[in-house]
Image (cartoon, rainbow, N blue to C red):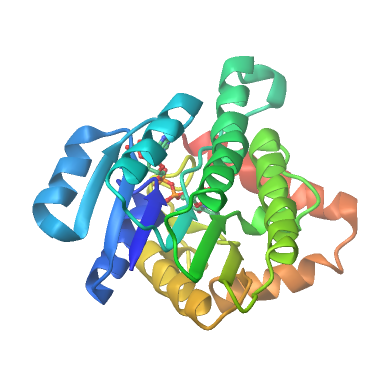
């Protein structure tokens, strides 16, 4: 299969790339850091095609699909993984940085999904995996406000696409939302974090792929994260916000 993944140079995107290549699939990997893309190309040769683009710019998404079209490349699965966050009190983070989070986590994801679903070079089987966060199940995210807002958007948007694109005789649509909890990556506030509940990115990637091919439309990697999502339904709103505030303030102090 041909898999188009955004954000392949680090973290969950890199782990997904390794896992798909190991399965014998071919990854078209998008990211901004050319040196890391070149390393992946060297390591995986024909199985990895680097696409060196900043997808927060719409014209770059056009270029990606133009390249695929011109080379008659059929993409089976799109994984919208690239995402960023900005930790801090909302008004103390520059407007530009808040906008960067919204541009990548929402606008680019919507653009990629729209271009992909209108792209003719896929067969009967089409898949989209959108990476949200367990934060989308929570009532908010003090000191990570814009990020949490974007992940709630991804959840709502993905659930709508799942319903709008049912499986038909002509097309096997599989759209899945992924809700990772804390995962050991270079993501803001996560670098060097160590705790029993922080998951390994490679483990997260293998759960995502397993769940997707089992036909699930929601993937919450890890038993502890599933438990927290359920527990969250029973915690009063203000208490939940206070707990989340504490967690984010602790992260800010460490940065
Ligand atoms: N880690 C966690 O605890 C956690 C928890 C819940 C959800 N998530 C979600 O999981 C996804 C992956 O996160 P991660 O932890 O793996 O993050 P990460 O380690 O920071 O990796 C992010 C990836 O996105 C790429 N990227 C960033 N901006 C980009 C842009 N403008 N254009 C193209 N690529 C871009 C980065 O590559 P370049 O810098 O080379 O462009 C990198 O490969 C995100 O959507 C995040 O919100 C993470």
Tell me if 62 is positioned left or right of 137 in this view: left
Counting labels gives 0
Tell me if 182 is positioned left or right of 52 in this view: right
Q: Nearer the viewer, residue 65 or 22?
A: 65
Q: Residue furthest bottom?
A: 214
In the rendered view, would you say 69 is above or below 170? above
In the rendered view, would you say 225 is above or below 129? below
Q: Quadrant of residue 93?
A: top right
The residue drawn where x is 44% and y is 68% is: 204
- Report x, y in % for residue 224: 60, 74
Tell me if 97 is positioned left or right of 241 in this view: left
Residue 114 visible: yes
- Report x, y in % for residue 233: 84, 67
- Report x, y in % for residue 142: 73, 39
The residue drawn where x is 27% and y is 46% is: 71
The residue drawn where x is 63% and y is 72% is: 217
Image quarter hosting the N terminus: bottom left
Q: Nearer the viewer, residue 196 or 190?
A: 190
């Amino acid at each position: 299969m041909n898999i188009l993944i955004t954000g392949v140079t680090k973290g969950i995107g890199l782990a997904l790339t390794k896992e798909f290549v190991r399965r014998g699939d071919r990854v078209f990997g998008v990211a901004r850091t050319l040196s890391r893309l070149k390393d992946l190309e060297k390591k995986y040769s024909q199985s990895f095609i680097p696409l060196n683009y900043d997808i927060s710019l719409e014209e770059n998404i056009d270029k990606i699909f133009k390249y695929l079209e011109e080379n008659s490349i059929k993409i089976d699965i799109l994984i919208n993984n690239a995402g960023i966050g900005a930790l801090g009190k909302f008004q103390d983070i520059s407007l530009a940085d808040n906008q960067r989070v919204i541009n990548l986590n929402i606008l680019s994801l919507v653009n990629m999904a729209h271009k992909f679903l209108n792209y003719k070079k896929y067969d009967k089987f089409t898949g989209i995996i959108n990476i949200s966060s367990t934060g989308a199940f929570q009532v908010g995210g003090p000191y990570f406000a814009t990020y949490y807002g974007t992940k709630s958007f991804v959840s709502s948007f993905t659930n709508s696409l799942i319903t709008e694109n049912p499986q038909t005789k002509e097309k096997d649509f599989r759209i899945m939302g992924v809700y990772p909890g804390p995962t050991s990556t270079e993501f803001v506030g996560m670098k060097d974090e160590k705790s029993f509940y922080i998951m390994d990115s490679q483990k997260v990637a293998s759960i995502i792929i397993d769940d997707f091919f089992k036909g699930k439309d929601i993937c919450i990697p890890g038993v502890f994260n599933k438990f927290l999502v359920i527990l969250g339904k029973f915690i009063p709103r203000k208490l939940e916000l206070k707990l989340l505030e504490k967690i984010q303030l602790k992260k800010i102090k460490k940065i």
